[in-house]
Amino acid sequence: MTLTGSSAMTEATARTFAAERVAVQRALDGFCARWLGDVAPLTAEAIRYALLGEGKRLRAILLIEAYRACGGAGNAVDLAASVEVVHAYSLVHDDLPCMDDDDVRRGRPTVHRVYGVPVATAAGLAMVPLAARSAWHAAKAMGLSDAVSGDIVRDLMDASGAGGMIGGQLLDLEGEGVHLTLEALERVHRLKTGALIMASVTLGARAAVAPESRRVALARYGASIGLAFQIADDVLDITSTTDQLGKTAARDLDLNKSTYPALLGVEGAIERAVALVEDGCAALQEEGLLTPTLEQLARYIVERRS
């Protein structure tokens, strides 16, 4: 489950992303060593299980690459890992029986299947404040001011809360068994999936102390590729196998959810995702921020196979 296999990605870029993924994985190991000492042992074990399995680390890599595009010269890996903690929390709770009730995630049993629902629920809840503490510590270690460090924590928590992932998840649950319009479906996924992806790149800009115009351009890029990511997920859900995806295939059909292929057809959904990627890259081009790595990450999102 790596950032490879995209026709838009050069070998040099793939090597860069592979190295960044390894660095983020090490930072997540460090997160567990640093922050889980005061957590109840079984809950801590469940958090480690959720964090340290296979993962693309896409959001972390987006943060690192946005930071560099904005002129950041420090080490943003620990900050990037904090975003992955929030993402992992969302997956733990998304898989719970009261949500999507899934058995497989990242090619292995979901957290609640291994540790039980109460422990998985507690683990997810604990990961949010731990991510906030980690982000603050990482920002300060980068030499950022209290004000900028506070903005970073606030933006991360906003992306994970009622105005972001949690709000989107609620709308997603309310939409099961209901025929949503394209506009309503995109509203769900701009929150549920897009909010944290958008935050990943704007946090990179904040960490680089970039001007507002650059944060705005990166926000448009992040919003566009975040929605494209979900559209690609919907397409993969009906065109790939469980083994290929590392999670249960055709789950959207089982839950009777509205999807982009159902509304637009597979080809129409792919065209919509490609158009979003083009819009996001155009936003960066206008601001002089479109690096080869950010462009190739955007194109990977719609060309990936898992």
Image (spheres, rainbow, N blue to C red):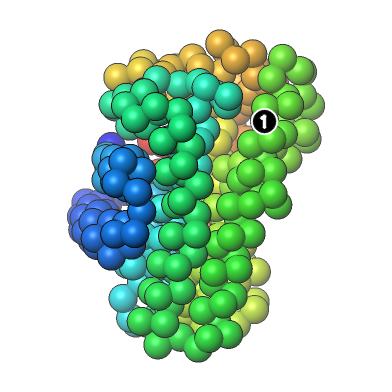
Please name the amino acid that badge 1 sits on. Answer: Asp
Labels in figure, total: 1
**Occupied quadrant, residue 262:** top right
Between 11 and 149, the one lying in front of the other is 149
Q: Residue at x 29, y 59 (%)?
A: 37
Indicate the position of residue 101 as horizontal and vertical percent values: 50, 21
Q: Is residue 279 left or right of residue 41?
A: right
Could you say which is closer to the camera, residue 228 or residue 140?
140
Q: Residue at x 64, y 36 (%)?
A: 169
| Residue bearing mark 1 | 172
Q: Residue at x 35, y 18 (%)?
A: 242
Residue 255 in view here: yes
In which quadrant is the C terminus drawn?
Answer: top left
Where is residue 31? Give x, y as percent: 30, 61
**Residue 285 seen in this snapshot:** no
Q: Quadrant of residue 212?
A: bottom right
Q: Pinpoint residue 134: horizontal percent, then vertical percent.
A: 40, 67
* Above or below, comparing residue 242 to residue 45 in the picture: above
Write down the quadrant of residue 20 in the picture: bottom left
- The residue at the point 60 percent across, 65 percent down is 155
Give the quadrant of the N terminus: top left
Residue extending furthest top? 254
**The residue tagged with tag 1: helix, strand or loop?**
helix
Q: With respect to residue 175, does 155 lie above or below?
A: below
Horizontal side, residue 210 vs residue 35: left or right? right
Dot 1, crowdedness within 10 Å: few (<14), some or many (≥20)?
Answer: many
Side of 10 relative to 99 (left or right) = left
| Residue 46, image x, y percentages | 33, 40
